[in-house]
Image (tube, rainbow, N blue to C red):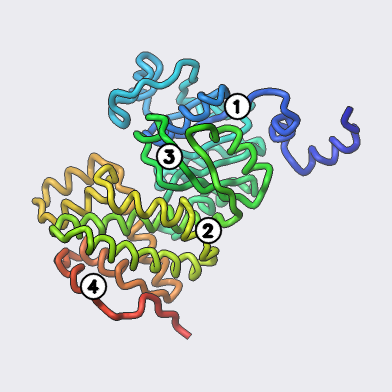
Amino acid sequence: MYNLKFLSIITRLLNYNLIKYLLGSENVKVTILGAGAYGLALATMAKINEHNITIWSRNQVELDELEQKHTNKRVLPNYILPNGIEYTNNLRKSVKNSDLIIFAVPAGAVDEVSKNLKKYYKEQAICIASKGIEQDTCLFVADVLKKQIDTDKIAVISGPSFAIDIVKLIPIGLSLGSLVPEVRKIVKDALENQYMIFEECEDIIGIEVCGSVKNIIAIAAGIIDGLGLPESTQAMFITKALNDMKEIIVALGGNEDTILTYAGFGDLLLTATSIKSRNFRFGKMLGEGQPKEIIDSYIENTTIEGLYTLKSIYKLLNNKNVTIPIIDLIYDIVFNRKEPSEIKEALTSRQKTIKKSK
C-alpha cells in the first residue's frame, strides 16, 4: 500500500493523470490535436499500443470522412486507420480525462489552439510534434505554447519520419526531448513499439532548431536538385548545412551534440534528399524555373513549413546578430526574386558560416 501522505505530496508535484499512469492502473488516454498526416500516423502508433485515442480537428469534412471511412484521402491516400479511434471538433471533450495531449497542428496554428486549450488544461503531459517558429515573436513551438499554458510538462519529438512511412509500419527513430523524466516516460509508453523507437535527451531547444531549420535547408537542397546538379554537390551541400545547423543550435542556446541525433542529421538527411518532402519539392520547382502560377498554386494548396519558418528564422538570426549565408541566400531567392542559380556560387564561398557581433 502506498502511504497516503506520500501520495499527497506527489499529487502536488505531478498531476493525477501522470500518477495514474506511473502506477500502471490503466492504458494511456491520448488526445491528438490535428487530423493531418502526421497526427494520424502518431494515432496509429498509439493504437497499436492499445491506448485510447481521440483525434481533434476543426475541419468537420475531414472528421466526417474519418468517422465514416477511417481515412483522410487528402493527406494519406489509400490508408485506413485502425478501428476504435474517436473523432471530435469539441476541444473540451477531446482533452477531458486525457493523460497525454499531442500537438500535431501546423506551427502557425499552435498559438490559437493552445489559447483555446488553456481553459480545459488539467496539467496533462504535452507532446509537441509540430515544427516551426512563430513569425511575429520568433518563438519556437514550445515557447509559443508556454505563452498560453504555464507548464513544464512539455516534450518535443522530431526525426526522420514521413507520415506515409510511419503507417507502413517500418522502423522509425525519433528524438524525444523534455526536462521532465515522467513526461518522456509517458510519451514513450504511448508511442514507442517495435516500429517506432525514441532516443531521449533534455535539449528541447536543439530538437526544435533542427526540426525547423532542416525544412529551410530542404528548400535549398530542392533548388540544387532542380538546377540539375549531381549527387556529389548535394552531399557537399548537406555537409555544409549540417555544420550551419550545429552553429545555429549553439547560438540559440541548445546542445551542439543534438546535431548528431535523429532530430539533427537523421531528419536533415531525409528531408533534404527525398521528393516526398514538400519543402524539397518546393525548392525543386524553384530550381527548375517553374512558372509563377504553378508555384503559387503549390504554396496555396500545400503546407510548406520551411516557407513559413524561413521568415521567422531569418528575423530571429538577425535579431541575435548571427549570420548564416545560406539562410540569407534562400530568403533572397524565395522572397526577393534572386536567381536560384546563385546557390552554386554560394556552395564554394569561403565566407565564414557564422559571425557574432561583439
| Nearer the camera: disc 3 or disc 1 | 1
The residue that appears at 20% across and 68% down in the rendered structure is 343
Residue 197 percent coordinates (x, y): 52, 40
Q: CA distance from mark 1 to mark 4?
A: 50 Å
Residue 91 percent coordinates (x, y): 52, 29
Q: Earlier in the sequence, mark 2 or mark 3?
A: 3
Q: CA distance from mark 4 to mark 2?
A: 28 Å
Relative height, residue 332 to residue 87 (above, below) = below
Q: Which residue is mark 2?
A: 205
Amino acid at the residue labelled 4: Ala
| Nearer the camera: disc 1 or disc 4 | 4
**Along the viewing direction, whichever of 156 and 194 lies nearer the viewer:** 194
Secondary structure under tag 3 reads loop
Secondary structure under tag 4 reads helix
Secondary structure under tag 2 reads helix
Amino acid at the residue labelled 3: Val
The residue that appears at 38% across and 66% down in the rendered structure is 315
Relative height, residue 126 to residue 318 (above, below) = above
| Nearer the camera: disc 2 or disc 3 | 2
Q: Which residue is mark 3?
A: 105
Mark number displayed over residue 346: 4
Q: Left or right? Give the position of 205 relative to 214.
A: right
Q: CA distance from mark 3 to mark 1?
A: 19 Å
Q: CA distance from mark 2 to mark 1?
A: 27 Å
Location of residue 210 by image quarter: bottom left
Q: Earlier in the sequence, mark 4 or mark 2?
A: 2
Amino acid at the residue labelled 1: Lys
Amino acid at the residue labelled 2: Ile
Q: Which residue is mark 1?
A: 29
| Nearer the camera: disc 4 or disc 2 | 4
